[in-house]
Image (cartoon, rainbow, N blue to C red):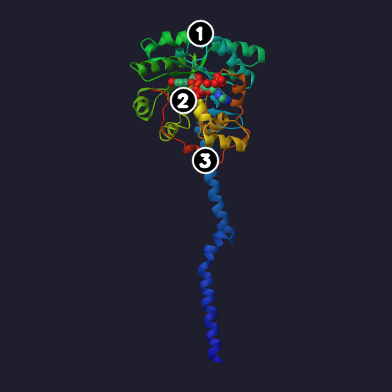
Amino acid sequence: MKKVFSALLTLFLILALSSCTAMPKESVTETSGSSETQTTASAKETDITQTTVQEEGARVGEFDFKTKTVMLNSGYKMPVMGLGTYSLDHDTCVNSVKALLGSGGRLIDTAYMYGNEEAVGEGVRQAMKEYNIAREEIFVITKIYPSQFGNPEAAIDMALKKLNIGYIDMMLLHHPGSNDVEAYHAMERYVKEGKIRSLGLSNWYDKELTDFLPKVTITPALVQNEIHPYYQEKDVVPFIQSKGIVVQCWYPLGGRGHTKELLGNETITAIAKAHGVSSAQVILRWDLQRGIVVIPGSSNPAHIKENLDLFGFELSDIEMEQINALDRNEKHDWY
Ligand code: NAP
């Protein structure tokens, strides 16, 4: 009896000791209020830190899907989707700009090289009147071409005159080229004078950007490069974004001559079908979910309206991956 009692006592002591050893672990995951409170508190602290940093300016580059804008490092907000005007002749361009602004779009991309800055200005002024839109609501991007870099002041003055909308929201250097740093310095002076609000670059990649940034005072707010499902720039995009610079894509639908192939891609059409949207909308939404601003070109008011309608659906992680897997490193233009 004595032996049985002592065995029971030993067993009891072993059990008691082992439950004590297990206690801290269990208390973290299950029961101990204090440990759990500590975990929650430290998680909250992390959240608070992140929020504070964001509120203090790290919101730069972050897409706000409610206001459909992104905060630029220049302090201005820019719409995340708009209209590209490459190859649109005067009348078509005026109509497209008006179609965009009449459908709620507010971002327009043009360039000296497109020969339609006057048409963009005309469309903007007409739409402001017809739809009662304030100038500050509209965001116009234009670009100066390398052939203009020798006399950038004349190029900027000409753009201001042709657009005739008061100020230029954003001006880009269209391509790297000789005298590009000096041309950028001239744009910086126009920013100081309030004639241009934000600056950016186009067709600048990681190496070009690394060389360029130390030479300028105002960090570019945006880089506009070729990006579409067949040319995704998986390294360049995060590199640019890591510098607090917003990425915007040209040829989002592959560019004229390639859109059929892209819009008819089986993966993209299947995703479009699943969401009850068009292939173009799927591609543009894929860009937005990568944090890339879209400026699809269009001469068709129905397409323009459709291209703005990107917020009633969301691509799943799997769908994003399916499109990511379509990358072929296939550039559709030389620069
Ligand atoms: P894109 O946007 O890839 O494709 C434009 C083509 O897509 C047009 O033929 C258009 O036809 C069609 N399209 C548009 N929306 C559509 C829809 N919902 N459904 C079916 N088809 C649709 O090519 P992009 O216009 O050449 O490029 C976009 C913009 O990027 C240019 O307009 C320009 O502003 C800029 N860009 C910049 C550079 C640079 O070096 N920085 C170079 C090229 C372009 P419809 O007219 O019939 O709608």
Q: In terms of depth relative to the viewer, which is nearer, 176 or 273?
A: 273
Q: Is residue 83 above or below residue 121?
A: below
Residue at 50%, 8% in the rendered image: 162
Give how far across and how far down residue 263 sits, in percent: 53, 29
Give the distance between the C-alpha atoms of the residues marked 1 and 3, in whole angstroms: 44 Å
- Asked whether disc 1 touches disc 2, contact meaning CB atoms under 8 Å apart, the reply is no
* Mark with earlier residue (1, 3): 3
**Mark 3: secondary structure:** helix
Residue at 52%, 40% in the rendered image: 50
Near mark 1 (Cα within 10 A), the count class, few <14, some 14-19 or many ≥20, is some
- Asked whether disc 1 touches disc 3, contact meaning CB atoms under 8 Å apart, the reply is no
Q: Horizontal placement of 239 versus 284: left or right?
A: left
**Mark 2: secondary structure:** strand
Near mark 3 (Cα within 10 A), the count class, few <14, some 14-19 or many ≥20, is few
Give the distance between the C-alpha atoms of the residues marked 1 and 2, in whole angstroms: 23 Å
Give how far across and how far down residue 185 sits, in percent: 39, 17
User: Residue extending furthest right?
Assistant: 131
Name the residue carrying label 2: 222
What amino acid does circle 3 point to?
Gln
Can residue 69 be seen from the camera position used here?
yes
What amino acid does circle 1 point to?
Lys
Q: Quadrant of residue 328?
A: top left
Classify mark 3 as within 8 Å of ligand 1 or not, answering yes or no: no
Give how far across and how far down residue 133 sits, in percent: 64, 16
Name the residue carrying label 3: 50
